[in-house]
Image: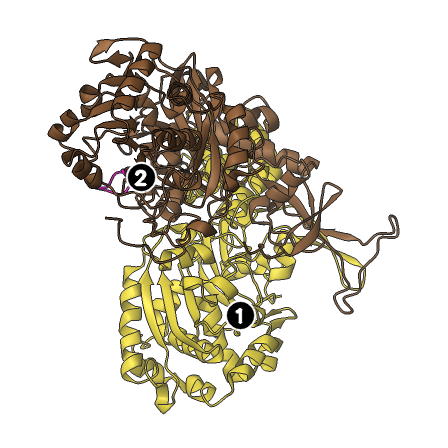
Chain colours: A yellow, B brown
Amino acid sequence: MPAPQQRRIIFKHIDEPGYTNDLACYVRHGGYEMLKKSITLQPAAIIDEVKRSGLRGRGGAGFPCGVKWGLVDRKSGKPIYLVVNADESEPGTFKDRYIIHQDPHQLIEGIMISAWANNVKQAYIYIRGEMPHGARILEKAIAEARAANFVGQKILGTDYSCDIFVHRGAGAYICGEETGLIESLEGKRPYPRIKPPYFPAVLGLYQCPTIVNNVETLCHVKHIVEMGGDTYAKIGTPNNTGTRILCVSGHVQKPGYYEYEVGKITLGELLNEVCGGPLPGRKFKAVIPGGSSAKILKFGETFTLKNKDGTSRTLTVEDIPMDFDTLAACGTMGGSGGVIVMDDSVNMVEALANINAFYAHESCGQCTPCREGSLWMKKITHRMVHDQARSEDGSLLKSVADQIAGRTICAFGEACSWPTQSFVAKFGDEFKAYPETKNAPKRDGSLELV
Amino acid sequence: MIAPPKPDLVTVNVDGKEIAVPKGTNAIEAARLVGVDVPYYCYHPKLSVVGNCRMCLIEMGMPAVDPATKAPIMDPATGKQKINWIPRPQIGCATNATPGLHIRTQSPQIKDCREGVMEFLLINHPLDCPICDQAGECKLQEQSTGYGRGYSRFIEQKNVKPKRTQLGPRVMLDDERCILCSRCIRFCKEIAKDDVLGFIDRGSYSTLTCYPGKALTNNYSLNTVDICPVGALTSTDFRFKMRVWFLKQTNSIDTESSVGANTVVWSREGVIYRITPRRNDEVNDTWMPDSGRELYKSVRAADRLGAVRVNGAASALDLAILAAVDLLKAAAGAVAVVGSGRSSVEEQFLTQRLAATLQASATLVGRVGEGDKLLISADRNPNVRGALVTGLIRELPATKLSALGAAIDAGKVRAVVSVGEDLAAAGLSAAQLAKVAIVYLGTHDNATAAAAKVVIPTLTVFEKSGTFVNQQFRLQKFLKCVPAVAGAHDDLVVLTRLIAALGAAAAPAELHALWAVLAAEVPALKAITFANLPETGLLLDATPYAGLPFVEGETLHYKPAAPAAAAAT
C-alpha cells in the first residue's frame, strides 16, 4: 500500500516557487480574509470552533488548545496576554522556522484571530535567539501588517486594537518552557515557575492571565476559522485532529519536513516510503519520534495496545501511526514532531552521550534533581565514551534518571531523563558491552567521535 | 487591643493524623504541628516560596468526589471517603492547606525522593566539613544523616568553583558549598530591599555572585549567613574562630535602638564569639542588623573601666560608696541625676529611687538617629519607655543636657550622679564638668569618667540580666551571657548600696527579689515576675503615653500611632 499523500495546510505555500514572505503575496493568496471574517464573529464563537476542532498543541505536550483557552481567567479584570512560543529549540525539530521564514503572515493572521477570540490587547512573539533572520522577517511582516491595519490600533476599522511585539531570546532551551519563557520575557532569568500557583492562564506574564501557544498551533487556528471546527475535526483521526508537520532527520535517504493528517501515516510509511528508507547498506536501528526528549523506539520491539472494544492489537515500530495517543500508548510521545532516525552504524552509548551533553548544558540550574542529575548523567556518558567505561554504568544512569523524572519544577526533568531511561531500558546490552566494543575498530572506517 | 481576626481553620491529614490549621498553611508547617519533620533547604517561613531544592517532596491527596454529582466517593474497604493520591510527589512548601488535604511524608516513594535529592546535592559538594564553619549547624549534614543513603555512587570529577569570594565587607562566599537554594538572593530582594545578589551561568555551573560593580554592603548582610543552610556564606568576623558546638547560647536583646531585636549570644568560657537573631514574629521575625552583631566587642574593649576610682586613685566599692554619699550630702538640694535610656528597667527603677532619695531632678539623654524602616528605629536608646514606665521621667528626653548645663552655670546644681551617660557627649562643656562633683557609674572610659570624683565600673548588657521596654511597649528580657570583667560591679548592687547608704529604705539587689518590688510598686508591671516573662516578651499598656511625641517612624512590625513627631528638642 503506497504511503498516503501529504496534506499541506500549514505548509501549503512553503517552498512554493514564486511565493514570497511579503504581505502582497500573502494577500494575493487569500491572506487576512479569515481575520476579516473573524472580526465579524463573536469571540466566544471562535473559541467554540477551536474547542470543537479538537486542535491539540503542536509544541510538545499536545494539550488541547480550546481547553487551554477555556482556562484563562477572564474575570480578574487584568489584561490577557498572548505569547507565541517561537523558541523552537527541541533537537530534531525544524517546522516553526519555515513558517516564520517563508509564511510569516500566516502566523500573524493566526495570532490576530486568536487575540480577537481571547480579547488580547497585546501579543508577544518570543523567538529563539539563534534565529535572528526569522526575527527580522517577523519584524518586517508585522510592520507591513500594521501599515495595512491588520495589526495595531483599531484594526480593519473596528474598535479592536492589538499589537504584536517580537522578543528575541538569548539562546536557552529552557525558554521554550512556557513559564520560563514568561520569566525571560519579563527580563529575568528563565527559571520556570512552580505550578501551583503560577499557572499562566491565571498568573502568567506580569502576573496577568496569559495564553502561551506554539507557532504551528496558532497557524491552525486560521484554518479552523476557515473551514469550521467540525470540518477541521474530520481531518486526521478522532482526538488527534488536523495535520501536523513531521521533521525527519538522521539516517534516511530523504530527510525533511512533511505535513500529514495526524495519525494517517505510520512511522514505517514515513521512514521507508516518504523518506526513502535507510541509507544504502544500512538498517534502521532506532527512532526518536517527537524530538530528542521523547523516549526512543527500537526497531524490532512490539507494543500490545488495548482497543476501545476490549480487544488488543500488536504493533511493530513501523506500524505506529504518528498521532499523539498511539505514540503515548507506546511509551513515547508525539512531542514536537521531530523524528530522529538512527541506523545500525550508531552506537547507542555515544548517541546518548550526545543527548546528555545537550541537556546538561541546557538545564537552567534552578531545581536540584535536574541541575545535578543532568550533569551527572553527562559526566557518566562522557566518561564512558572518552575515558574508562564500566559495565555497571548503564544501571547507574537509569537510577540517576529515575531520581529526576517527576520530581522537578518543570518538564525538563522528564525531557532529560526520558532519553537515558529509554536508551538503557532498550539497549541495555550495548551499555553493558560498551567497555569492550568501544575499543573495537569501527567496521566502516567512520570517523571517531571527537 | 483589638483581637486578631479568627483564622479560617481547615482540617488536614498528615500521615494519618488529623489537625486543624489556618487555611493556607503549607504542608511543612502543618506537619510540624503534628510533630512530623519535613526536611527542606530553600523554604524559609519569612521568604517567598520558590520550591527549588525539592527536598520537601510529599505525597498529596484529596478526598474523591464524583465529578458530576460532587458526592463523596466512599472506599468500601475502610468506610471512609476515598482519597485520590496524586502520583507525582508535590513540594510541601507550595502545598497549601485546603479542606480535606491529605499528605504522606513517610512513604517509600518519599524516602526515595529524599535520598535522591540528598545524593544530588552532595555529588558536587566539596564535603570539606572538617574545615567548614557551618559544621555542627549545617542542614546538609543533618539531613544527609537523617534522609540520605550514607554512601556515594559518584566517581566523576566534581565541579570546581570559586572558593573565596568576598561578597561584602562582612560576608564571604564559598561557591562550591552553595546548593543554590536562593535564600540569600530572596532575603536581599524581599527583606533588605537591596537586590544585589544573583546567579550567573546555568545548570550545575550556576554561581552566586554580586551584581557587577556592587557589593553586599547593606546593614543586614549577615542575615544571609544565618539563613544559608550550608557553609557557602560565612561571616568574616566569625569564620575560623570557633566550633559552634562549643558555644553556649544565651538569649539577649539588641540594644542598638528601641526596636529591641531578639538575639542569641554565643559564648565560650566567658568570651563572646558571635550574636545571631532569635525568631520573634512580633518584633524582628528572624532578622537583625549587622551593626548589632558587633556590640559584643565592647565587653573586652581597651577602654573598658576595670577599677573603682575615687578622686583619680584606685579604690574599693565600699569606699567609693562612702565617698559618693559624702559628696552628695555636701551638695544636698543641688544634686541632679542623669539616668540612661540604655539602662534596664530595673536599673531605671533604682535610679528613680536614688533621685527621690536625693530629692534630685532626673533626666535622660535622648539619642535620635535615622530609622532604617526595618530593624533600627530613630530612637537609638533601647529603653526610653522603661524610664517612662518606672516613673524615672515623664517627658521624652532631649538629646542635649542644655537645661542641666544652665543649672550648673547658675550654681543650682553642684553634684551630678550619672548612671551610664557620658555628660560631655550629652553637651556639657569641660568647664561645666569641672564645676560639679560627679559620681559616674559606667562601663567605658570617657570625659565624664576622667572628670568624675567617684567612678564605679558597671556591667555591659552581656554581663547582666534584666529587661527592656521596646517601642511597642513590649517588655523583653535579656540574660547574662558571660561573667563580668574583673573590677566591674553589678549596676543593681551599686545602686541599691548607694540608696541604702543615703539612708533610704533598701531595695533588694537580687533581680528576682527586686522584681517583687517592681511588681508591687510599678502599676504597669503588676503581677509580672522576671522568671515568668515569656521569651517573646509581654506587651504593656501603652495608652498612658499615647500623647507623647515619640520619634520612631515605621519599622518592621511597628507602626507609630501618630505621624512621627519631629525629633524632641
Q: Chain of mark 1?
A: A
The reply, left or right, for residue B62 in relation to residue B133 is: right
Q: Is residue A370 above or below residue A115?
A: above
Whether residue B179 appears in magenta in the rendering, the answer is no
**Is A394 placed above or below B241 here?**
below
Residue at image mark 2:
B380
Residue drawn where x is 45% and y is 66% of the image: A208
Callout 2 touching callout 1 (CB < 8 Å) = no
The magenta region covers B209-221
Of B55 and B493, the residue lying toward us: B493
Q: Quadrant of residue B219?
A: top left
Could you tell me what secondary structure mostly forms the magenta stretch?
Answer: loop
Give the numbered dot on residue B264: none
Compare residues A167 and A442 and report the one nearer the observer.
A167
Q: Amino acid at mark 2?
A: Arg
Up-down relation of residue B178 to residue B100 (above or below):
above
Q: Amino acid at mark 1?
A: Val
What is the number of the mark on residue A72?
A: 1
Extreme residue in the left direction: B431
Instruction: Give the crowd class for mark 1: few <14, some 14-19, many >=20 residues within 10 Å.
Output: many
* x, y percent for residue A376: 47, 32
Q: Secondary structure at mark 2?
A: loop
Query: Viewed as shown, does residue B61 lie left or right of B163?
Result: right
